[in-house]
Amino acid sequence: MAAQFGRRLRRGATTTAVAAAAVAALSASQAPGVAPATSGGSQEAADATPPPGTPVTGNSPYYTDLPPLNAPDSPGTSGDALVTGPGEAGIPATVLAAYKQAEKTLAETDPACRLPWQLLAAIGKVESGQARGGRVDANGTTLTPILGPVLNGVGFANISDTDNGAFDGDTVHDRAVGPMQFIPSTWATWGQDANGDGRKDPNNIYDAALAAGRYLCHGGRDLTVQDDLDRAILGYNHSREYLRTVMSWFEYYKRGTHEVPDGTGVLPGGDGPDSAGPLPTPTPTPKPTPPSKPSEPGTTPTPGPTPPGGGTGGTPTPTPPPTPAPVSHIEDAGTGRMTATAGQDFAARAKVRVENSRGEGVAREAVRFSVIGDTDTRFPDGRTSVVLLTAADGTVTAPALRAGEKTGTFTVRATVEGRDLAPRDFIATVTERIADTIVRTGSEAQTAEPGAEFAHAIQVKATCRGAAAAGVEMTATMIRSADDPAENDKGPYFKDAQDNPLRTLTGLKADANGLLTLPKIYADGNQGTYRLRLTSPGGGSLDIELQVVAPAESSPSPSPTPTG
């Protein structure tokens, strides 16, 4: 079901001439074989073949305001340039950062798609007015819910509840949710955690933008091919009017944009998705002070009102806001020594501060923490990188890393997304697993006759601070005595692969429960009491006594009793 149109199609600067120009310019870009759409009305969807799969929005209403004629055209600049332009070209800072981050992620994971961030911006403009003018918190989550209408089949699609009201608060029918207006059933398939907070939240612009990008790219699409681009947009909302509206904003944003503070974006008019809170009140423009009345001959002139701050009347000169200092560098904000044993969490976490040229912390900068090097250490959920926003003081802390099994050093690198700044690197080290205690699991006496095999296998358990030391390495050595740990040259021994005597074994490794069963032990021809010592990194040590004894003499059989 296509969106409803009419009074909200053309507002303010969006005149009939603008709309006609946009439609004329975009009609040539439609897929081959598609007939031109008629103007207005929900029948626009009738001449469009929907792509396979569930649409993102459930064909909910959207904003149909078109961009103004005076597009922010800056000759000689790329579409990614930040330029001064009309208010409609301003995109809230966090929302813009989310679009660009999604473009970068898709460029790495699906480069053949060639997703431009301006396409996400166009869809975000049409779906939610850039998250209601950028009303998001420091992590990119909307301050109030953005919900589409109930999809109960009355004027819209009929979609029964699929999330038990978890996202949309409706346990009977679904509603489109968040700045990119995902219905819960589609979010269940395409939801992403792009800001590394451990949640897939359709109300978060970072998560929603990446999910939208992946949806637009699926099916092997190349969005530089017009057919693929048209199908991707129609898959988002099955309406030719929607396609033309998104394409008009896409072309507009490609000609230049600029960043505006969150919460100050231009809000579209019309009947877009509902918001659970009031819209920001626009700041009124001060009226100019009327000039002084001209004096008549022979009279004293009557001065006009004195402008604030003095002066001689007339229109007051507004004081321009201070220009913020540019983001300059990224600093270590107190990261400790990053060391952990294999399989354990790092106690210290990478922490940085993004600063401007005056040394002040800069809030809401997207910082990417990446694991670099030959290591299997990972962030939560097995990720090698996470993106988080800086707090009000410019600081941000990475999640705790979980050390893998590979020991050695690697790098944790912090970079600021979208900024050409030198990265901040931290060296992290994974050490071998350790055990502070080794104990036997059995109590059988270890005895053997000369030249024989010890009958009972020896099993031990390694622990660290009372917990099983999984995978810890141990060394077993036949030592001379409790006071002399040198290897003994006689007595019990192990065997190597060629059955040669071996009195030291290295590289023994406990299992997941910290258990280790030693290989078979053999006795040579020397009788006596010997000592086996097991040791492990971390101080764990255990001595086991081995005895080689002569066989017990058998008693002679009694002589037969004579008879007779």
Image: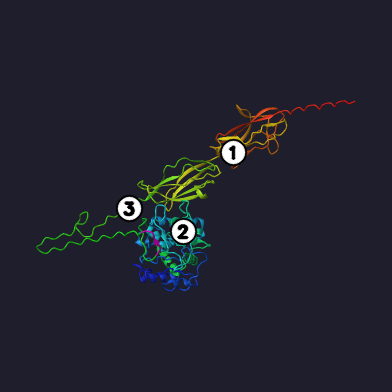
In the image as oriented, which residue stretches furthest toward the left? 298
- Secondary structure of the residue carrying tag 2 is loop
Whichever of callouts 2 and 1 sits on the residue coming sooner in the sequence is 2
Q: Which residues are magenta?
A: 272-277
Which of 513/559 is in front?
Answer: 559
Which of 360/348 is in front?
Answer: 348
Residue 54: x and y in percent read 50, 64
Which of 354/540 is in front?
Answer: 540
Whichever of callouts 3 and 2 sits on the residue coming sooner in the sequence is 2
Locate the C terminus by quadrant.
Answer: top right
**Main SS type for the magenta part?**
loop
In this picture the colour scheme is rainbow
Q: Is residue 553 above or below residue 338?
A: above
Q: Residue at the spot x=65%, y=36% of the render?
A: 458
Circle 3 Cα neighbour tier, 10 Å, few/some/many (<14 / 14–19 / ≥20): few
Q: Residue at the spot x=55%, y=34% of the render?
A: 539
Instruction: Give the distance between the C-alpha atoms of the residues marked 3 and 1, in whole angstroms.
Output: 60 Å
Q: Which residue is mark 3?
A: 323
Q: Residue at the spot x=76%, y=27% of the render?
A: 553
Residue 455: x and y in percent read 70, 35
Q: Is residue 192 above or below residue 551?
A: below
Q: Which residue is mark 1?
A: 473
Judge depth for marks 3 and 1 and give the one in front. 1
- Residue contact between numbered discs 2 and 1, judged by CB atoms under 8 Å: no
Asked if one can make out residue 386 in the rendered structure from this viewpoint, the answer is yes
Judge depth for marks 3 and 2 and give the one in front. 2
Residue 202: x and y in percent read 45, 57
